[in-house]
Each structure stands twice: as structure tokens, then as C-alpha cells.
Image (cartoon, grey):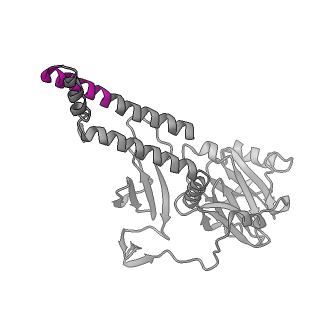
């Protein structure tokens, strides 16, 4: 605001049709392509290369001309049609304790599609695709049915005809970002009860994909509403983790474990503050009357006695403040 210099520039893949913001430092940007981004602008400094400036938090069904909020629902206009988007309660969702989540976990390798990128049958197929510059680096590949499915570093899932070595269809699972190189290494593909569908997991997100139609049915998990934590083929249920709730629970658990230390610390701080306040409230002159009277008793003149008493009282007050602060600090360190 002082110089007018641009601190950071963010280029979107489509035209902006609406901008909103929060007091906490997030900017909500709705694009013409039907995607809504949240930008985290706090802490951005000039010259710093930000890795996680923004994230897609909403995706409308089609391109839109305008958007607005109405009674906590989001309205999207496309042509002469207005769509109303609501957050609905998932009746199939049940909350379980962390220790109960073990019933959803399995060590059976048959519930996941292995990465066969380096296998004798699939490796030649991928090499031919790469020679034609059709596929970049590959994180996962597997033959399912009559096709080879390949998930690349570019965030695209390819459906490959193994006989012709050609790509029949492809879908973009996630937009490639500069910091995805490390994150994308962790890819797990789960089998579901429907043989035509897979759950492709990348870190804390997953996508339920219909391989026959090559379309994403659901995107599961994000940093805003929760994180994907696993899948049970037996139960046909997805496990989600609320990261914010987990942090709050951890904080509460920590307080339970250290309530004695917290109580002692609060008591020490209150005691030190009261001692310092008492000194400050008297202006450090609490000892002046007593010292003056004592000195005059021993024959010191009133003027000199007052001067000595004032200097002494202020010195003692300063030492008292430093002593209260120092001893309080040492006691807190000792407590923890």
C-alpha cells in the first residue's frame, strides 16, 4: 500500500467472474470454467516462491456466467438457467473412533492394483508411448480387463489399447502443480466392489473413477472438508479423517496429560504479575516512609534521609521486579 509494488501475481486458467474474501486472509475466486479457488494470501512475501498459494474448493457442473451466495447456498448462472448448490448431509456417513478404524483396514494385497510399470508386459507399452511423447513420467500402471491404465506425473489417467499402443481415452484427475513432484509419488489404486470402478488415491485425496466411461464419479477428500484415510472393500466404505478435529483432539489430550504443569505455570505467572503490579502501583516508593523514619532516628537530616530512602526504595523495587520475573521464568522452566 505504501509503494504500489506488486508482491505476488497469480495467473488463473480461465476468466474471473467473481471475487470474495474473508477477514482471515483468504480470497475466493470464481472462474468462468466453473471452478472456485481459495487463495491463502497471508504471509506471501515479495520474491518468495509460494508452493501452496491456492486450491480448488468447488467445481460447478458446467461453465458459468456469474455466481453469488444466497442463504449459505451458492448460486451459479449459466445462460438463462440458475443452479443452486447446497451442502447436503450424507446419511451413509457414520463417525467412528480412531481405534475402531482398524476394522476398515486390510493387509490383503488383493484389494489393491499393484504398480506394474516395470513388468515385462507393460514396460514396452509405456516405452512406445513415451517415444511418441504421448505420456510423461509414470507413477502407476496396471492391466485391467483388455486395457492398460496409466497414471502419469501430469495428473492424467490414460486408457491404453495394449494391442495398438495407442491412447483411447484420458481424463485429468488433478491439475499439475509445481510442488506435486514429491506429493504425487504416493499413489495407491484400490479395487472396489464394482469391477469397472477404482479408487485412485494420491496422498490425502482419492477419486472414484469409472474405467468403462472414463469419468470421475466422486472426488473424495481435501484440506478444507477432510482427508481420505482408507477404503474397505468388504464394507464398501470410505474412511475420512477430519484434520482440524484431529488437531483439536490432540491439543485437548495434551492438556489432559499436562494439567498439573499448566496449573503450576498459571499460578507462577499470576504470582509474579501481582508482585510486579504491587511494586508498580506504589511507584517503587513503598519503603520511603519507613527508611526515612529510621534514618532520622539515627540523626540523619530529613532532606538527606528522604533522598537516601528514595534511591534505596527505587533500587529495591527494580530488584524486586527483576527477581519476580527471573524466578518465575526459572520456576516455569523447572516445572516443564
Which quadrant would residue 17 be assigned to in this image?
bottom left
Q: Position of residue 141 (x, y in %)?
A: 76, 53
Q: Position of residue 242 (x, y in %)?
A: 59, 62
Q: Position of residue 54 (x, y in %)?
A: 46, 51
Instruction: Name the residue: 37% across, 36% down.
Output: 46
Instruction: Name the residue: 24% across, 32% down.
Output: 290
Instruction: Name the residue: 78% across, 70% down.
Output: 195
Q: Compared with residue 299, is residue 155 higher up or lower down, i.e. above or below?
A: below
Q: Quadrant of the N terminus?
A: top left
Q: Is residue 202 left or right of residue 146?
A: left
Q: Is residue 144 visible?
A: no
Instruction: Name the residue: 68% across, 44% down.
Output: 137
Is residue 303 a member of the stretch shown in magenta?
yes
Q: Is residue 178 left or right of residue 66?
A: right
Q: Is residue 26 left or right of residue 102?
A: left
Choose between 257 and 232: the one closer to the eye.
257
Q: Quadrant of the C terminus?
A: top right
Choose between 279 and 216: the one closer to the eye.
279
Q: Is residue 140 visible?
A: yes
Q: Compared with residue 182, is residue 106 higher up or lower down, i.e. above or below?
A: below
Which quadrant would residue 212 be assigned to in this image?
bottom right
Q: State which region is magenta.
A: 300-317
Q: Is residue 176 left or right of residue 144?
A: left
Is residue 132 a member of the stretch shown in magenta?
no
Which quadrant would residue 275 be assigned to in this image?
top left
Magenta: main secondary structure equals: helix
Amino acid at each position: 500500500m505504501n509503494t504500489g509494488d506488486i508482491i505476488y501475481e497469480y495467473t488463473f486458467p480461465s476468466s474471473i467472474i467473481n471475487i470474495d474474501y474473508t477477514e482471515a486472509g483468504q480470497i475466493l475466486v470464481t472462474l468462468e470454467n466453473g471452478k472456485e479457488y481459495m487463495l491463502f494470501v497471508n504471509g506471501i512475501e515479495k520474491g518468495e516462491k509460494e508452493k501452496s498459494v491456492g486450491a480448488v474448493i468447488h467445481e460447478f457442473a458446467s461453465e458459468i456466467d456469474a455466481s453469488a451466495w444466497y442463504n449459505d447456498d451458492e448460486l451459479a448462472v449459466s445462460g438463462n438457467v440458475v443452479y443452486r448448490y447446497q451442502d447436503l448431509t450424507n446419511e451413509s456417513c457414520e463417525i467412528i473412533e480412531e481405534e475402531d478404524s482398524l476394522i476398515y483396514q486390510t493387509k490383503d494385497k488383493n484389494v489393491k492394483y499393484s504398480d506394474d510399470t516395470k513388468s515385462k508386459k507393460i514396460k514396452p507399452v509405456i516405452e512406445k508411448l513415451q517415444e511418441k511423447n504421448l505420456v510423461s513420467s509414470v507413477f502407476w500402471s496396471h492391466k485391467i480387463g483388455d486395457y492398460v491404465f496409466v497414471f502419469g506425473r501430469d495428473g492424467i489417467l490414460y486408457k491404453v489399447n495394449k494391442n495398438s499402443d495407442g491412447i483411447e481415452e484420458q481424463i485429468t484427475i488433478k491439475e499439475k502443480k509445481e510442488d506435486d513432484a514429491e506429493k504425487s509419488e504416493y499413489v495407491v489404486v484400490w479395487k472396489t466392489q464394482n469391477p469397472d470402478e477404482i479408487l485412485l488415491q494420491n496422498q490425502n485425496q482419492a477419486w472414484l473413477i469409472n474405467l468403462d466411461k472414463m469419468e470421475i464419479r466422486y472426488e473424495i477428500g481435501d484440506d478444507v472438508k477432510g482427508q481420505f484415510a482408507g477404503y474397505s472393500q468388504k464394507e464398501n466404505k470410505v474412511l475420512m479423517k477430519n484434520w482440524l478435529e484431529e488437531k483439536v483432539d490432540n491439543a485437548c489430550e495434551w492438556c489432559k496429560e499436562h494439567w498439573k504443569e499448566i496449573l503450576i505455570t498459571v499460578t507462577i505467572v499470576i504470582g509474579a504479575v501481582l508482585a510486579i503490579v504491587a511494586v508498580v502501583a506504589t511507584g517503587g516508593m513503598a519503603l520511603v516512609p519507613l527508611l526515612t523514619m529510621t534514618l532520622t532516628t539515627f540523626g540523619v537530616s530529613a532532606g538527606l534521609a528522604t533522598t537516601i530512602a528514595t534511591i534505596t526504595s527505587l533500587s529495591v523495587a527494580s530488584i524486586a521486579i527483576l527477581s519476580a520475573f527471573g524466578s518465575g521464568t526459572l520456576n516455569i522452566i523447572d516445572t516443564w
